[in-house]
């Protein structure tokens, strides 16, 4: 029963909180909270006379797990592909400084045109 409860806890947690945030989470948080939740679920199934107490404890632990997940959501690392505004401005300035002139473009076109004719002559 405990293993089924562990699987249920992780499936529910990843669906509600998001698998990415669960992957970012420090492993002792996941381990302790999931074992406590699975233990409470198992105890609820085993002892029907204490279900109300165990259910309220389970809700408290779920709120703690939600708070930890929200913390990792708020503090998730930035995407590496995104650039800051300063980096984009520097990149644009660099590209504008390196734009070729009209004479450079015409000489490149002549060279490209000549090399294409050279390939087809063979």
Image (spheres, rainbow, N blue to C red):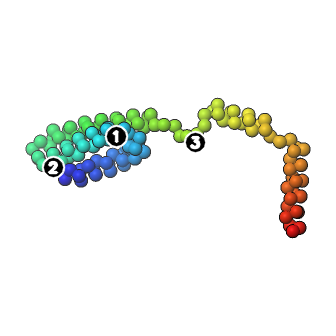
Which residue matches tag 3? 81
Count residues near mark 2 (Cα–Cα under 10 Å), then give few for <14, some for 14-19, many for 20+.
few
Q: Could you say which is closer to the camera, residue 2 or residue 49?
A: 2
Quarter of the image where one finds residue 61: top left
Give the percent coordinates (x, y) of residue 111.
Answer: 88, 53
Q: CA distance from mark 3 to mark 1?
A: 26 Å
Along the polypeptide, which appears first: circle 2 or circle 1? 1
CB-based contact (under 8 Å), mark 3 and mark 1: no
Q: CA distance from mark 3 to mark 2?
A: 48 Å
Quarter of the image where one finds residue 49: top left
Dot 2 falls on a residue whose secondary structure is helix
Residue at (86%, 41%) from the top-left corner?
Answer: 101
Is residue 72 found left or right of 52 in the rendered image? right
Is residue 37 found left or right of 89 in the rendered image? left
Count residues near mark 3 (Cα–Cα under 10 Å), then give few for <14, some for 14-19, many for 20+.
few
Which residue matches tag 2? 45
Q: Where residue 27 is drawn, which disc sits there? A: 1
Q: Could you say which is closer to the camera, residue 88 or residue 62?
A: 88
Give the percent coordinates (x, y) of residue 33.
Answer: 27, 40
- Vertical arrangement, residue 4 with respect to residue 24, above or below: below
Give the percent coordinates (x, y) of residue 119.
Answer: 85, 64
Dot 3 falls on a residue whose secondary structure is loop
């Amino acid at each position: 029963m405990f293993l089924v409860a562990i699987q249920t806890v992780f499936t529910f947690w990843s669906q509600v909180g998001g698998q990415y945030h669960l992957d970012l989470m420090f492993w002792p948080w996941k381990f302790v909270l999931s074992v406590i939740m699975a233990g409470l679920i198992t105890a609820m199934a085993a002892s029907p006379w204490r279900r109300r107490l165990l259910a309220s404890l389970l809700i408290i632990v779920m709120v703690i797990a939600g708070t930890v997940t929200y913390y990792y959501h708020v503090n998730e690392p930035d995407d590496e592909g995104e650039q800051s505004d300063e980096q984009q401005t520097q990149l644009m300035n660099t590209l504008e400084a390196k734009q070729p002139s009209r004479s450079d473009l015409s000489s490149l076109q002549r060279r490209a045109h000549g090399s294409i004719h050279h390939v087809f002559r063979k």
